[in-house]
Image: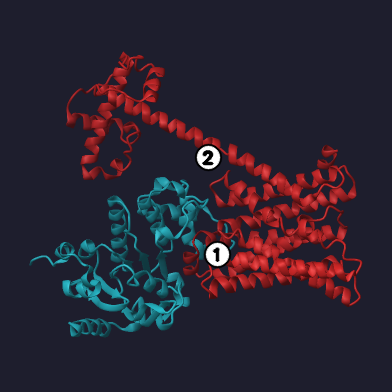
Chain colours: A cyan, B red
Amino acid sequence: MFDLVSENGVAQCSNLEEGASPLAIRGLTVSYGQKPAVFSVDMTVVPGQMTAIIGPNGAGKSTLLKAALGLVPKVSGQVRVFGADLIKQRERIAYVPQRASVDWDFPTRVLDVVLMGLYRELGLLARIRGAHRAQAKACLERVGMADFADRQIGQLSGGQQQRVFLARALAQNADLYLLDEPFAGVDAATEKAIISVLKSLRDAGRTVVVVHHDLATVRDYFDSVFLINTRKIAEGPVEHAFTPELLQEAYGGRLATAQMDQIQPLAG
Amino acid sequence: MLFDALLLQLGYNATLVSIGAALLGGAAGITGTFLFLRKRALVSDAVSHATLPGVCLAFLLMVSFGGDGRNLTGLLLGSAVSAAAGLWCLNWLTQRTRLAEDAAIGAVLSVFFGFGVVLLTVIQTLGVGRQAGLEGFLLGSTAGMLFSDALVIAAGGTATLFVILLARRALTLVAFDPDFAQTQGLPVGRIDMLMMGLVMAVTVVGLKIVGLILIVALLIIPAVTARFWSERSEQVVALAGLFGAGAAYVGAALSASAPNLPTGPLIVLVSFAFFALSLVCAPQRGVLAAVVQRRRFQRRVHLRQGLLALAQNQPIYEALTLRLLRQAGLARADGVATDAGKARAAKALRDEKRWEFVRRDPANETAAALYDGLRAIETVLTADQIAEIDRQIGGPQEVLL
């Protein structure tokens, strides 16, 4: 069992030049107080793929993402983005936080939120021009929210909020997209819209990493899986790393048989 | 008298105070809006209370060196230093210990203020003679303002406005989504510090007019007032500046219109009047608007449910439903539908069936998501689409209106 894990991990690492990886993490430990939320984790994201970060509640999925972005201080470890320091590569990363992380009663409109994605381009002072607005509108169009550009964000449903956040990330035109639970609590139409946008990003050669909680959709949505429960359990292509044995290891006894049935590889 | 004051006809000093107060009020309203949007409104209360020991120490220092203890620049410098110390303690407590921000605010506020009051008492017992006026820093002074004081306030207010003009985009982004701001490369910690620096500047500059106990009102009340009137942050900021400047101007004029009326408290009361008015009357977020909207919505729901009940020959139990149907001429007092009522009821039931059809087909997901029981299907689908649905579900093609 254990051999299998390390085999997978090693295979994955050696396949890939570390410098070429959009996101390479070595020995990362993050802790809240005295208890590590993520312990000594290595991760090598494969470029041009969609990768799911999977694990039980409290396994450190979001923390891993935040630490990779420098949003939470790390105790130890190293993060390389496209082979360089995070600070030098910021413009190549787009981050979609959990939608509950902001106050949706904030006095702003949908289009203004998307324009925030152009902040790097606009800087502190540049005036927002028609071209910027058109760019932001096009991003809203891609997530099916063009009609909502002038709405106050407080009027949006959860799924619409999530799509606006995705549109903001699209406006950044990044090479690496990091999304924290984009499918949590959204309607079916939104889930479909988001996954099709993410797949089109992948098909355009961008790299997408998603913190994901719905095991039933992993096979349909993702190319690679990163299984974590404080420590890395497995990493690799879905067919190798997303197996009942490894999931059992990550989730312990918490995985019901019904769920296991859903994730069994299809026959043939 | 009041009218004269508002028109700046009460002489040089009153005019000076009014204009100075308006500038300060505007700067405070604008600065406070960012504080309010960042949900750190109460931090300003800790900062303002933390100025007192600085004022007292500066006074003691200046006197002990044989200078004039009441030199405003010196006193304000002292207040800025101790406000910064208070802010540092606050940040340290929230970042390095497990104390939540509210507890840290309480601790810093009371300890600094207590220390300041002790120093104030010591100064009084020392009988230095010229301490008169230091109490003015607590609640603001009713006494006049020197031209140099007005200059200090004008300069401080203008500088604050200028900095905010430069940093507004960053301040807004950090207030809305600090994590995202940081991934965009914004120095979130330093922007928060800048915001606190501006709050400190407004506080220090406003000490002389409003006093440290009430300055928090100048920062926060205009912001929450403005929030009632707009859903866009730039507008909220601008409106808060206007409300703040207006309240300060009117308050200062009021206090000048009769002897011994305190400036600071009057400004706060005028500001509160603006707030109360907005709370009640604001078009979207106001209390009245909310009541009206709720009642209108309730009527729509009752009318719709009543029509569906009529169409299906179900009894109507609710008095409000019956009354609404009767008022609209759709039903008689005994609950039997009129001809108009029958037609509307048939249409309502038909629409319900059409919706059912739309919602059954996964291909119509977007349209189906808009169903809430009240929305008219014509606002979602075109006449052609509805005709197509009718063709598929059969039944009467024409609905009498």
Who is closer to the viewer here, A242 or B133?
Answer: B133
Determine whether the residue tagged by mark 1 lies in a helix, strand or loop: loop
**Image-quadrant location for residue A127:** bottom right
Q: Is residue B45 visible?
A: yes
Residue placed at 40% from the left, 20% from the top? Answer: B323
| Marks 1 & 2 on one chain | no
Q: Amino acid at mark 2?
A: Gln
Q: Chain of mark 2?
A: B
Q: Amino acid at mark 1?
A: Gly
* Above-or-below relation of A197 to B19: below
Residue B284: mark = 2
Residue placed at 86% from the left, 43% from the top? Answer: B258
Residue B178: mark = none
Position of residue A94 in the picture relative to residue B394 (left or right): right
Residue B211 image offset from top left, x and y in percent: 76, 58
Quadrant location, the N terminus of chain A: bottom left
Q: Circle 2: is it few (<14), some (14-19), or many (20+) Cα within 10 Å?
A: some
